Amino acid sequence: MSFDPAIWRLCLVTDRPLSRGRSLTDIVAAAVQGGVTMVQLREKDSETREFLEHAHALKALLKPLGVPLIINDRVDIALAVDAEGVHVGQTDMPVEIVRSLIGPGKIIGLSITNATQIVRPDAQAVDYLGIGPLYAQTTKGNASTPLGVEGFRTLRAMSQKPVMAIGGLKPDNSAGVLSAGADGLAVVSGIVSAEDPKAAAQAFMNLF
């Protein structure tokens, strides 16, 4: 199904270890005030109950604001809180099964790091792609080799899907990837670790 193209512009991908001791909801609330259009809750190291508690808190915060909540990896958590969608990686549950579980009206995103992945059926069946990493980054220990702007441009040309760039993005290095065809930016530390998450989000949104 089709979604408002504006939601792809700026996705905040959460990472509590990078939050400098601040509460997740405070950071997300400030970032949304700054213009974030989608939030992906990523909890790689949380137990299920803790993950669920954070998901409920963000759903309560974001639903009145009309900002979609996407759950990373965990379809069960997404179903439990009626999140707007799920983002999966190459080693997570296959997209076809995710769709059968969450239904046709929800958003599914897929991480892409190379040309082989982008031509597979999974990549044709999702609502958006997250392509990266663009630049060297530290938020994902097993990250692939950075694509750079030209590597991103090549992959972007291979799909008609909405595409968000991810990986080491900052306001001063993101204009090029937008020019290379990105519909939006998925940002982790550039907002989560910022002294002022609202101002950081505004700086990214100014690129549009």
Image (cartoon, helix red, strand yellow):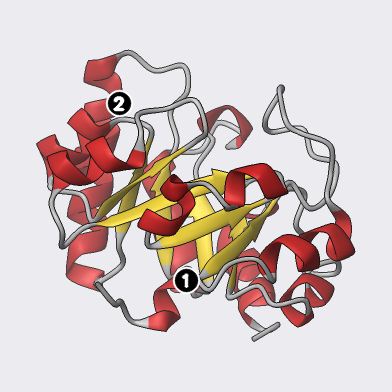
Q: Quadrant of residue 101?
A: top left
Q: Earlier in the sequence, mark 1 or mark 2?
A: 1
Report whether 28 appears left or right of 57: right
Quarter of the image that includes the N terminus: bottom left
Q: Nearer the viewer, residue 79 or 115?
A: 115
Q: In the image, residue 33 lies at what x, y percent?
A: 44, 72
Q: Is residue 74 above or below residue 122?
A: above
Q: In the image, residue 80 lies at what x, y percent?
A: 11, 35
Q: Is residue 124 above or below residue 44?
A: below
Residue 51: numbered disc: 2
Badge 1 amino acid: Trp
Q: In the image, residue 126 lies at what x, y percent?
A: 38, 56
| Secondary structure of the residue carrying numbered label 2 | helix
| Secondary structure of the residue carrying numbered label 1 | helix
Q: Quadrant of residue 196?
A: bottom right
Badge 2 amino acid: Phe
Q: Is residue 165 above or below residue 123?
A: below
